[in-house]
Image: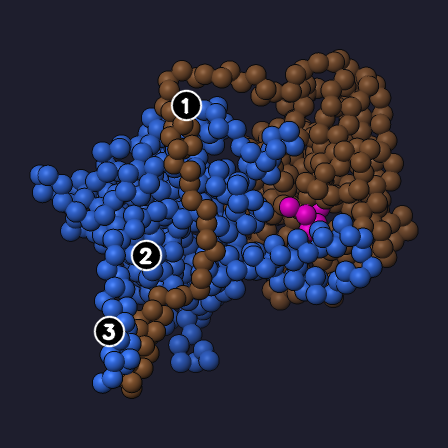
Chain colours: A brown, B blue
Amino acid sequence: MKRAFAGIVVSGVVACIGCGPTRVVAPGADAEAAGKIRATLVSASSAGDSAESATAATGTGWGTLKGRFTFAGSAPQAKALVVDKDTEVCSMGGMKLLDRSLLVDSSTKGLSNVVVFARKTGRVKTAAAEAALVFDQKNCEFLSPVFAARVGQTVEVRNSDPIGHNTNIAGTAFNQLIPAGQGTAYKPDAETGMPTMVTCNIHPWMKAYAVFRKDGYVAVSGADGSFTIPDLPAGETIEFQVWHERSGGPNGAVGLEKPELKWTPKGRFQVKLEPDEVKDLGTLEIPAGVVGG
Amino acid sequence: MNRFSRIAFLLAAGCLLSAGCGKTPNASYRLNMVEATKQRLTTEQEQQVATVLLAMFGTPDDPVALPEFGLDEAKLRLASGPVRSDIVGRKNGLYREHCAHCHGVTGDGMGPTAAFLNPYPRDYRPGVFKFKSTERADKPTHADLLRILRNGIAGTSMPSFALLSEPQIDALAEYVKYLSIRGETELSLMRAFFELDDDAQGKLPETREFLVDEMAGPIAEKWKSAAAAQIAVPDMPADIDLVASIAKGRELFYGDKANCVKCHGVTGLGDGQANDYDDWNKAIVEINKEIKGGLAKAGETSTSGMSAEDAAEHRKQVAWLGKFSHVVDGDALTPRTIPPRNLRLGVYRGGRRPLDLYYRIHAGINGAPMPAAKGTVPPEDIWHIVNYIRSLPYEFDGELGADRPMVARDRF
């Protein structure tokens, strides 16, 4: 009996070897379906012409979309960031750098730094951006918490501090040393989708977001929460994407209860403009829970 | 021994013998469950990704490539599959013999030995490689991969495979490219679900236009164009005064222009900015933050005042956080910080030729916090920094003034 017990113990021990953290079972591939897909991929003919690819370019004229984001709740007290380096520049005269992830204007309740952009449009008014933009940093803080530019537009990444920084844009392989008082030109070469994080590795508290779009139909809400996107193509249904840094939605999407705009949990809504129309969405109130207030 | 105990003993012995004696299941690629869960994919969507990847890339035993990928299937066959000899006695299955135990069958850097190594083995799936002769945003050249395989990476667990034959090393480099294109395509596919229009009903189009032209094609294209993206390095001036150059490099190292001191430290021991992460580990750190913050918030939220819909939504969110936490436990290694390189050891991971150091400073190190100096630091200054860095392991008291390194035992 004793031996049998030992045998069970031994086999138990053996069975246990290799039980590391259990991995969630991943679903397997469907071999039959894969065979069919492969057949379409290797067939040389580029069959199935992309009929439904681009939004049909219909309509003429241009319109403007406006609106204002507000925060439903009391304006939160911004926390001070931990600044433990280069303090003679980064906290000059005892100045404290604040966490800017939830900036609410106390009088108007306006929520800043909400990003709105068109997902795709059939027509674009200006083919490319002309003017160069400046993305600056001073006193160890990026001056634009959320920065929007067009793909191919020249962005002058500048350092107005007497100390060196580096500017690291996640997902783009741009991570460049910016010496004191200097700058370097950067041309975004692809769309970001949702905004991507910008950091300085030398000063880890420094954080901003960048959003790059081909068509330039993107706006960042200002101090009072308002935004304007001009020169949108009229006569077509345009789907817009809304994002905020603190949103708990997928990839930072802001979902609102607005059935009249077909607002989805993925933070998208639809608008159709008439030529020369200035459509004002009015006040768009974001519940405190949505942006982790 | 009575009858009962004899049966029990035989049963136990039988269990012991049968453990591991069955037919070994075929190796399979593991889905990137961390990204799948992050993107909140449904089981059907995860399965669609697995199916599409099978169609485009085959299995670990039978890898395939599309002509657009620019990969040599004969080389892939030599590197893939179980370890065996083919009909002419040539060794096959090289990746599983030499690489998979660290880098994993999937190339996810999660092989069985990965957790014991520091630094962790490279996860090829994001398509980011550190030590190369190309600009930061570009892929390494084939020659860059061959060099790493031949020389190994000093200061890490990556050994030299110089004893393998040229065709074998060549096949392994090709297979690494294949795994990387596959992994990066997988990431693109998983992220594409979010970009779908609502009328797609959560299913990716299984057309050539989408899968090849939009998803895998652009990734493969970057690998194909790597050779043309090599950094043009001006020669170090032949008549350079080395002592003066080292002094200039030292000035740059400590100055505001090159700023090396901020991370590599005033002593050059790599003890400046010591709490940063590389991109692979940072991704997990950010996910852990999201899970922790989400669970804390869920703990404070009471469902009692909620509408039925909101409560259901809340439960869904909590379930997702729980699943995510479970997935990260099993499918990611515990994040580790990345210390800046200690420049007094004379050990350089990407190679110790002056040219290698030039590449690292010019382009920075992709995936790591090390930024690029190109554009803001002119080439002759980069050469001065290279010369100073190469002198650092040999700098002794008084040679260059008062800023000598601290004696190690005085540091604590």
Residue A252 on the magenta segment: no
Q: Which mark is residue B143?
A: none
Disc 2 target residue: B102
Q: Position of residue B53 (x, y in %)?
A: 41, 37
Q: Residue at x 28, y 73 (%)?
A: B12
Q: Nearer the viewer, residue B211 or A38?
A: A38
Distance Cα–Cα, label 2 vs label 1 = 35 Å
> Is residue B366 depicted above or below A154 in this figure?
below
* Residue at 68% across, 18% down: A123
Which is more toward the observer, B180 or B407? B180
How many numbered marks, from 0 up?
Answer: 3
Question: Which amino acid type corresponds to the residue marked 2 in the rendered image?
Answer: Cys
Q: Which residue is mark 1?
A: A40
Q: Residue at x 29, y 51 (%)?
A: B25
| Picture disc at residue B10 | 3
| Contact between labelled residues 1 and 2, with CB atoms less than 8 Å apart | no
Give the number of the mark in front: 3 or 1.
Answer: 3
Q: Amino acid at mark 3?
A: Leu
Query: Which residues lie in the magenta part?
Result: A244-250
- Whole-Å distance between the Cαs marked 2 and 3? 38 Å
Taking the magenta stretch, the answer to whether it contains residue A248 is yes
**Could you tell me if residue A91 is visible in this image?**
no
